[in-house]
Image (cartoon, rainbow, N blue to C red):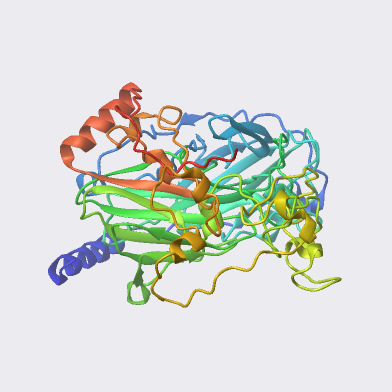
Amino acid sequence: MDNSRRNFLRRASFLGAAGAVAANSEAARAQHEHHAPPQPQAPPKSEKKPAAPQGDRRPAHAQGEVVPVEVPDVPRLPWTLENGVKVFRLVPEVVEWELIPGKKIIGWGYNGSVPGPTIEINEGDHVRIHVTNKLPEGTSMHWHGLEVPPEQDGVPFLNQPLIEPGQTFTYEFHVHQNGSFFYHSHMAMQEMMGMIGFFIVHPKRPYAPRVDRDFGLVLQEWALLPNNPIPNTLAMEFNWLTINGRSGPHSTPMLVRQGERVRIRMINMGMDHHPMHIHGAQFYVTGTEGGRIPETAWYPGNTVIVGVAQARDIEFDAVYAGDWMLHCHLPYHMMNQMVSMVGPMGQAGQGPRTGLGMEEGMGVVTQGHALSEDLGPGMGRGMGMTTQERNVSNIVGPQDQHQGHGQQQPSPAQGKGAEVQPGQAERLGQVSNPDDTARRKRVPGYPQDMVMFMDKEVAKPETYGLPPGWTGSFMGMMTMVRVLPPAMYDEIQRRVREGIAEPPQGRAPAGHQHDHD
């Protein structure tokens, strides 16, 4: 942005602030004072005024107001206006949904959604949130990052009693902050079952520079055992990673018209930090779970770590047209249904053991040595799997059983950058013919990455125009920002309005598919 435009915006913001009338705030109070047990509550009888429509709107620069936040695949939480108070209703309950087509999961969320629906208000609003518990155990609500009275903070036994099954508890407070916040259960294992949602507070004066598109992404992780759709909340390793409750390629792309300014808000409720990387753009980090960062403290990048319980806002100008991936850059978070392996990679005649404890899965030596069979490959730390799997290395197999378990064939010495001599490629198992399956199996380390195409299964209006086979690159904590020329942007928005979903036409390119026979 040039100086003249920045100065103009600052002058405009100053003049708008000078004419604003400061709102009087009063101390918020709980429905159940003095820590009395919460009682079932009848719906209020006061006159209700429906909220304004929350559909797609024109860009901020055209309307002179803040842009509603789009959280793909997650609904907004509706509200009613009762005597000047915005009233919301949250229902903690069991939710079933699909991570990708065909992979169901049963978690805990709010109002039929995991993550929960987005709460979106304005700075200075007075809010009342009725929470009716439909879970089989007690719960509570914490408003992460918001400065509320202690009796509204949601810590059970410290600030309030548990909201028992079937009971309703009402939270009520004024909001004097602005930024990217979130709500979640304050019961640790319930958090790992999926109980989180955005709580977005728009500022009284729109941020400068103004954005045209504002998106929200919730980062979560799950440990799913074979044939069990219920997350293992005792696990400390996770084999399914999601953005807004879906794994790639099932996550819905974010649509941007070329030339627009974009904000993406990311929040993380899990056990791992996530270095979130975007292709095709450089951004500035402009906000955290503490609110807006002063412009003098913004810093550029294309990767930002979103730590556990943190929020990060990034902003950039969508200059370059294209379909740009946005993903966690941890390698194991770029896959679906992965397992952990430590210690020896190959054991003669048998595959990795399963049902290992957390210590073994984390590589903690309790007996033997670091390369002993006790620390051999296992199917996830602390996940309690009990099935047997095949060898993970094609270098060692049943033909070597007479050599004893844990013995590996010596590999040829390979100097870094050394030239491959005639005949050495044969010894190393290098493959020049991709159809030579037998030769491929003798390459050290094979197999590694796999490709699976799901173009038809995940087709939706937002994927229109993507090339055949695009889904082969999307797994785990991955989504994309589609920066579209105006004509293409308008066509896709038409398809979104009319619900037209078509998979790409033509055949997917030949992928690197593994033969495990």
Residue at the outermost left position: 4
Nearest the eye: 216 or 230: 230
Q: Where residue 15 appears, x then y in whole percent? A: 24, 63
- Relative to 114, is 333 above or below? below
Nearest the eye: 2 or 257: 257
When asked about the image quadrant of residue 408, the answer is: bottom right
Residue 239 horizontal side relative to residue 328, left or right: right
Q: Where residue 250 appears, x then y in whole percent? A: 47, 37
Circle count: 0
Residue 143 horizontal side relative to residue 32, left or right: left
Residue 434 horizontal side relative to residue 374, left or right: left
Is the N terminus in the top left, top right, bottom left or bottom right quadrant? bottom left
Q: Where residue 501 appears, x then y in whole percent? A: 35, 25
Q: Where residue 294 appears, x then y in whole percent? A: 37, 72
Q: Is residue 193 visible?
A: yes
Q: Is residue 181 visible?
A: no
Nearest the eye: 306 or 411: 411
Residue at the outermost front position: 423
Q: Residue at x 58, y 41 (%)?
A: 516
Is the C terminus in the top left, top right, bottom left or bottom right quadrant? top right
